[in-house]
Image (spheres, rainbow, N blue to C red):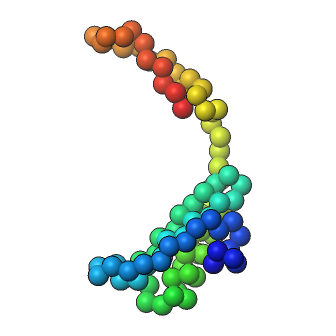
Amino acid sequence: MIRTYNGATGLKTGSTSLALYNLSASATRDDLSLIAVVMRAPTTKLRFSEAKLLLDYGFSTYSFQKIANKGAIAQNVEISKGTRKKCKSCV
């Protein structure tokens, strides 16, 4: 999957007594990073195909939207009965 999935950034397989065999996969496209987790899938082929389906769904449904620059003040909040009069809320 790392070599074949467009934008793949990571992959982890494993197993537990409750979740049985599982797979976590991550990918990034157009500044949007997603993680897919598949648990209790009985075969490797099914785990990988389900992870690809989840990531495909995420990339087709959601997009990255920048709402502010780092450190930008989103709003000033008035404080009553506090030790300060105002609080800056940063993004």
Against 12, residue 60 (above or below) is above
- Determine which quarter of the picture holds residue 59: bottom right
- The residue under the point 42% across, 12% down is 86
Identify the image quadrant of the C terminus: top right
- Residue 60: give x, y in percent of width and height: 66, 63
Against 77, residue 43 (above or below) is below
Q: Is residue 4 left or right of residue 18?
A: right
Q: Is residue 10 visible?
A: yes
- The residue under the point 52% across, 27% down is 90
Camera-side residue: 84 or 12?
12
What is the total number of numbered labels drawn onto the structure image?
A: 0
- The residue under the point 47% across, 77% down is 13
Q: Is residue 60 left or right of residue 54?
A: right
- Residue 26: give x, y in percent of width and height: 57, 65
Against 48, residue 58 (above or below) is above
Against 33, residue 37 (above or below) is below
- The residue under the point 36% across, 10% down is 84
Q: Is residue 57 visible?
A: no
